[in-house]
Amino acid sequence: MNSNDKKMPRRVAPARSAHMVEAIFGCKWSLTVYQLLKNGTKRPGEMVRSVDGLTTKVLNDCLRRNLEFGILERKAFNEVPPRVEYAVTPMGEKFIQVLDALEALQDEINASSAEADPR
């Protein structure tokens, strides 16, 4: 190699976004929550009633994690009884597009695996 040739630096995974993907896929309910929000379900009580097996505690943990990452935003209304709604942030929209792309990639991998091994 010539001394004039430039070496390419080693590429490192982006720490925060990689952690986000890992944490979101680690929570089996996050993708379901995104689907509920996409379908217009915004209140936690509605979410729990809409999905078998989803508990309030698990939902709150999932929502809290998504709030910390900035994927979701929480809006509290000054009403009696209290009302809280969740929505996807603009950054969350971008993040969900990445997750959708990963899902599409997995579908392609599954399809090519099925073609290669037709049992």
Image (tube, helix red, strand yellow):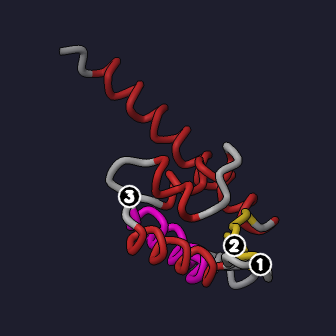
Give 5 or 91, whichever is nearer the viewer: 91
In the image, is residue 119 above or below residue 112? above
Q: What residue span does the magenta drawing correspond to?
A: 11-27
Mark 2 or mark 3, which is nearer the start of the sequence?
Answer: 3
Image coordinates for residue 58, horizontal then vertical, percent: 39, 70
Q: Are marks 2 and 1 in contact (CB under 8 Å)?
A: yes
Q: Which mark is residue 83?
A: 2
Residue at which label 3 appears: 54
Q: Are marks 3 and 1 in contact (CB under 8 Å)?
A: no
Local packing at callout 3 (Cα closer than 10 Å; few below 14, some 14-19, many 20+) is: some
Which residue shows up at 59% across the image and 47% down it?
35
Residue at which label 1 appears: 79
Give 20 or 57, whichever is nearer the viewer: 57
Image coordinates for residue 56, horizontal then vertical, percent: 42, 69
Q: CA distance from mark 3 to mark 2?
A: 20 Å
Which residue shows up at 50% across the image and 51% down it?
32
